[in-house]
Amino acid sequence: MAVNVANIVVGEATIKLGPSANATTIAAMDNFADVGATQNGVEISWEPDIVDIEIDQFGDAAKLIQSKVKVMVKTTLAEATLNNLAIAWNYDDQGGGAAADGDDIKANFAGSGASTNTFLFGTQNVYPREKGLVVVGSAPGSSAAAVKSRSFYTKRAISMESSMISMKRAEATMFTVGFRILPTVADTNYEYGKIIDQQ
C-alpha cells in the first residue's frame, strides 16, 4: 500500500458567517465576515439514522435504509464579543438601529458620550434565523511552502445548541456553538453544501 504523507491534514480552520445564502452564490460567500479565533478547532459531522428492514426468514436485517440524516458544525468561539454571543444564541449578529427588522445588536451612545454596544435579547420568533456559513481549513497537499485550502460552504445554518456566558478569574470567556445544517432544495445533489479542495 502506497502512503502519501501529503494527504495527512493538520491545522485549524476559520469560520465565516453571513446572511442566509439561499439566493447567494458560493463565490459571494467567500466575502462573509470572519468570526475570529476559535478554540479546539471546528467539527463537521454527518449523522445518518439507519433503519433495519426485517423479514421473517432472516434472523437479522435483510436490508438497511437511511431514514434521515443530520449535519452539524460545532466549534467554540474564543473572542467574547457581543456579536459572537448573538451568533451563539441564534440572534442576528449584524449591527443596526433598534427598529431595524432582525437586528438585535444596536450601537447607541451613553449620556457621557462614550460609545456602547447593547445586545438586545428577549422572546424570539418561533422560526430560528438561518445564516450562510463557510469553514476554511487546510487541504491535502499543504506544506510550509504551499498552503492549500479546504472550504466547506453551506447556505442554511441554524445555531441550536445550549450556550452560556462564563466570567472566571483564570479562564477565557468563550461561547460554544453548534450549527444544524439544513438542505437547500434548489441545489440538486449538494443540498447540504460543498467541500472544495484547492489543488
Image (tube, rainbow, N blue to C red):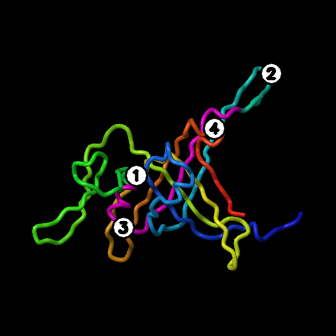
CA gap between label 4 and label 1 equals 32 Å
Q: Which mark is residue 57?
A: 2
CA gap between label 4 and label 3 equals 37 Å
Image vertical order of residue 176 relative to residue 111, above or below: above
Amino acid carrying label 4: it is Thr
Q: Which mark is residue 80?
A: 3
For label 4, the crowd category at 10 Å Cα-Cα, with few meaning under 14, some 14 to 19 and many 20 or more, is few
- Quarter placement of the C terminus: bottom right
Could you say which is closer to the camera, residue 154 or residue 81? 154
Name the residue beneath numbered marker 4.
Answer: 188
Label 3: which secondary element: loop
Amino acid carrying label 1: it is Ser
Could you say which is closer to the camera, residue 195 or residue 23? 23
Name the residue beneath numbered marker 1.
Answer: 162
Q: Is residue 116 left or right of residue 42?
A: left
Instruction: Please provide percent x and percent y for residue 86.
Output: 35, 56
